[in-house]
């Protein structure tokens, strides 16, 4: 089996058309590749945004924990007074 079955098929199916047929198949394959690369890049951007948002959530949780600790200390001081 060929590692380029679509190109080989284009050549063998219409030997009279030859180059023109191969050209069309090659263009189709290139469009599919460009589309796949676009999807991959979009997924990479989503992954980067997801990571950024996870870091932001972590930061907000840490700030929340610090504020809760401060509030507990404040309440303890109020009780002692």
Image: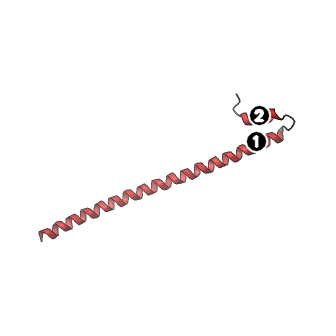
Which residue occupies 60% across, 50% down? 39
Question: How packed is label 1: few (under 14 Cα within 10 Å), some, or many (20 or more)?
Answer: some
Question: How packed is label 2: few (under 14 Cα within 10 Å), some, or many (20 or more)?
Answer: some
SS under mark 2: helix
> In the rendering, which numbered label is found on residue 6?
none
Quadrant occupied by the N terminus: top right
Quadrant occupied by the C terminus: bottom left
SS under mark 1: helix
Q: Position of residue 75 (x, y in %)?
A: 19, 67
Residue 52 left/right relative to 36: left
> In the rendering, which numbered label is found on residue 25?
1
Give the vertical position of 71 relative to 26 (above or below): below
Q: Which residue lies most toward the front here?
A: 13
Q: Which residue lies most toward the left here?
A: 80
Give the vertical position of 59 relative to 14 (above or below): below
Residue 38 left/right relative to 72: right
Q: Are marks 1 and 2 in contact (CB under 8 Å)?
A: yes
Of label 1 and label 2, which has the lower sequence position? 2
Tell which of 44 and 17 is nearer to you: 17
User: Tag count in the figure?
Assistant: 2
Which residue occupies 44% across, 57% down? 53
Which residue occupies 37% across, 56% down? 58
> In the rendering, which numbered label is found on residue 9?
2
Q: Which residue lies most toward the top here?
A: 1
């Amino acid at each position: 089996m060929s590692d380029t079955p679509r190109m080989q098929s284009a050549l063998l199916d219409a030997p009279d058309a030859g180059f023109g047929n191969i050209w069309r198949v090659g263009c189709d394959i290139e469009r599919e590749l460009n589309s796949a690369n676009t999807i991959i890049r979009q997924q990479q951007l989503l992954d980067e945004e997801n990571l950024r948002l996870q870091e932001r959530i972590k930061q907000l949780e840490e700030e929340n924990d610090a504020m809760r600790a401060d509030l507990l200390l404040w309440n303890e001081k109020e009780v002692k007074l």
